[in-house]
Amino acid sequence: MWARVIDSRGEWWDAGSRRLRTSLHLGDVDGDVTSLLIDKLGFIGVSFNDARAIVRLSPKSVSKVALVRLYYWLSTQLHRRIAVSVGPAGSNQHYEFFASGRDVLLRLESVLDPECRRSWMPLFAARTGNLANLPQGSALAVLFEHWRCTGGVFAEDSYRTVLNRFAGDRYVIFAPGAASGNFTVVRAGEGLLIPDKHAHRALAGSGLENIADHEYAGWVSRFYSAALDSQQPRCDHIRAYIRWPRAGRTERRYSRVILPCRTSDGQQLLLGVSGPLAVPDRDLEAA
């Protein structure tokens, strides 16, 4: 079987990874440290082959982000028989067997403490917002009003002033490609809250599908596709755990407006502008 662990940031590792041990200052510890990682550091152990899988975690210490990652993995397990052990390691370890990933999720929800259950959520969640309800004077409200006043025509000089002054350069301009859901980044603002500077610099000129976190790129493309198809602006309130190669998975909570625009020579563009989350976070729990 392949032995893996999911760490507290939602990243998968080989259970015997020397690099993982070194990063946790466990390089001089002999033997299997998986139980220590699960019981003390909130990791989740996952061992599997083509036919079955074994999942082990401790409800008292398990990382919420690790649970989110496990949630996504379990949702893809349609044919493996899955055994689950919940509790500290030891000779009396008890395993329960389930026929599907969904059954495992239901069982885990029943044993997690209330705080964990409130945080049992997918990596990406969104709720559609009302453009008319944007806080007056906020960056998103100002950009929406500017879009209305210009009739959706994108003049770089006028937008640059508004984006810099009000939005703090938190924006991305996309050009749609020939294929559905295919977008190229024309420009990415310097103010985007991306902790991985190399990935930030690489955005301009790349395809949306080539963003480092492919799961996030695939998820977010549907919002831009909807705005492109309808040619109507939209607002969404978002909570996302985005993975960056040099920074790991980072939580972001934000509101975003997508504005379909055209240049004076008729080129179609989509302007996405982000700002602080404009609704209570609980509004995203059922998204």
Image (tube, helix red, strand yellow):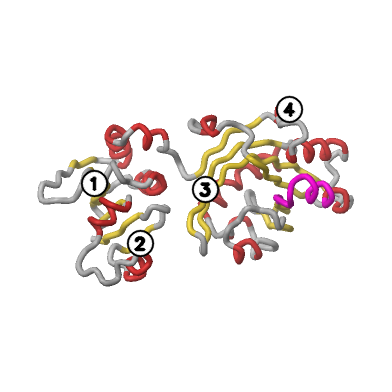
For the residue pair 244 and 47, the one nearer the viewer reads as 244
Look at the image and tell me whether residue 22 can be seen. yes
Cα separation between marks 1 and 3: 32 Å
For the residue pair 21 and 236, the one nearer the viewer reads as 21
The percent coordinates of residue 142 (x first, y second) are 79, 38
Residue 211, magenta (yes or no):
no
- Which label is found at residue 172? none
Task: Quickly name the residue at label 1.
Answer: 81
- Which label is found at residue 251? 3
- Considering the numbered disc 3 on the image, is that residue within a helix, a strand or a loop? strand
The percent coordinates of residue 119 (x first, y second) are 42, 37
The quadrant in which residue 16 appears is: bottom left
Task: Name the amino acid, label 2.
Answer: Trp
Task: Quickly name the residue at label 4.
Answer: 132
Task: Name the amino acid, label 4.
Answer: Ala
Cα separation between marks 4 and 1: 49 Å
Cα separation between marks 1 and 2: 22 Å
Mark nearest the camera among 4 and 3 is 3
Is there a contact, CB below 8 Å, between mark 1 and mark 2?
Answer: no
Relative horizontal placement of residue 274, taking residue 40 as reference (left or right): right
Instruction: Please give the range of residues in magenta.
Output: 160-171
- Considering the numbered disc 4 on the image, is that residue within a helix, a strand or a loop? helix
- Considering the numbered disc 2 on the image, is that residue within a helix, a strand or a loop? strand
Q: Work out whether mark 1 precedes mark 3 in sequence or the reverse, and give the earlier one.
A: 1
Task: Quickly name the residue at label 2.
Answer: 13
Seen at 28% across and 39% down, the residue is: 104
Cα separation between marks 2 and 3: 20 Å
Quadrant (top left/top right/bottom left/bottom right) for the N terminus:
bottom left
Look at the image and tell me whether residue 48 can be seen. no
Is there a contact, CB below 8 Å, between mark 1 and mark 3?
Answer: no
Residue 164, magenta (yes or no):
yes
Q: Work out whether mark 4 precedes mark 3 in sequence or the reverse, and give the earlier one.
A: 4
